[in-house]
Amino acid sequence: MANYIIYIFFGIAPSIIWLLFYLRKDAHPEPNKMVLKIFFWGILATLPTLIMELGLSETLSRLNIPLTFILILKLFIGVALVEEIIKYLVVRDKVLKDPEFDEPVDAMIYMIIAALGFAALENILVLIPGKDVILFSQIFKQTITISFLRFVGATFLHALSSGLVGYFLALSFFETKKRGQLIISGLIIATILHGLFNFFIMGLEKDFWLSLVSIIILLAGLGLFVSFGFKKVKKLKSVCKIK
C-alpha cells in the first residue's frame, strides 16, 4: 500500500509543480474549484485515451506496410494526435461555455490545466514498476528518477503542446471566419511536435546524445513559443462570455 502512495505522490508532483508555475501566468487567477475540476477531467480523460491508443495500435499493426511507417503512424496518429484532441475536447466541453472563461489567456491556462491532469495519471501508470522491482529502496530510487525525468520531459511536453493549442484557440475568438482553421492548425502543429518528441524518446537507446539534444531543442523552442503566446494573448481585449 505504501508503495502505491509513493507512486501517486511522485506521479502527481510533476503536474502540480508545472500547474503552480503556469497559474502565475494569469493576472486574474481562475477559481480553485474550476482549476480542480478541469485538472480532474484531464485525469479522467486518460483512461479512455489509453484504450483508444491500444485499439489504434492494434489496427495499425495489421496494415500491410513497412514497419517503419507503422511506427511513425503509431507515434504521430495513434498517440500524439489522439492525446492532443482529447485534451482539447476536455476544454471545449467543460470550459468554453462556463462564465469563468472570460478572457483570452484563459484558453491557454485551461488547456495546460487539462494537459497536466492528463499527464498526472499517465505518470502514475508509468511509475508502477515491473515484478522485478521488489526492494523498497529500489522502488523509491527508481520512482524519484522516473518522476524527475517525466517532470522535465513528458509532463512538460504535455503542458507546452496544449498551451500551443490554447494559443490558437484564443486567436480563434478574434478570427471567427477562421476559427475552425486556427484550431485545426494548432492541433496539427501540437501533434507534429508531440510525435517528434515521442520519436526522439525512442531514439535515446540508439543514438543517445543526438536524441537528447533534439529533445532539448524541441522543448526549448516550444517553451519559448508558449511564453511568447502568453505575452501576446494577454494584450488582447477581454472576450467576455464566449459561446
Image (cartoon, rainbow, N blue to C red):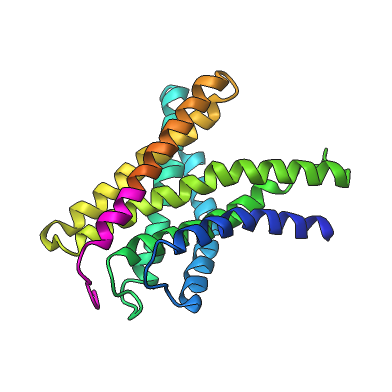
Range covered by the magenta-colored residues: 227-243
Figure check: 124 above or below 129: below
On whether residue 232 falls in the magenta region, the answer is yes
On the picture, is 91 further left or further right than 49?
Answer: left
Frontmost residue, 182 versus 54: 182
Figure check: 232 above or below 133: below
- Farthest residue to the right: give it: 135
Quadrant of the image containing the N terminus: bottom right
**Quadrant of the image occupied by residue 193:** top left
x, y percentage for residue 176? 14, 63
Quadrant of the image containing the C terminus: bottom left
x, y percentage for residue 228? 31, 49
**Quadrant of the image occupied by residue 145:** top right
Figure check: 76 above or below 102: above
Query: Residue at (80%, 47%) from the top-left corner?
Result: 140
On the picture, is 65 further left or further right than 229?
Answer: right
In this view of the protein, can residue 80 be seen by the observer?
yes
On the picture, is 145 further left or further right than 219?
Answer: right
Frontmost residue, 185 versus 67: 185
Query: Residue at (48%, 71%) from the top-left corner?
Result: 35
On the picture, is 145 further left or further right than 35?
Answer: right
Figure check: 12 above or below 28: above
Query: Residue at (57%, 21%) from the top-left corner?
Result: 208
x, y percentage for residue 93? 36, 70
x, y percentage for residue 165? 33, 53
- Farthest residue to the left: give it: 177
- How many numbered marks, from 0 up? 0
In this view of the protein, can residue 61 be seen by the observer?
no
Frontmost residue, 170 versus 61: 170
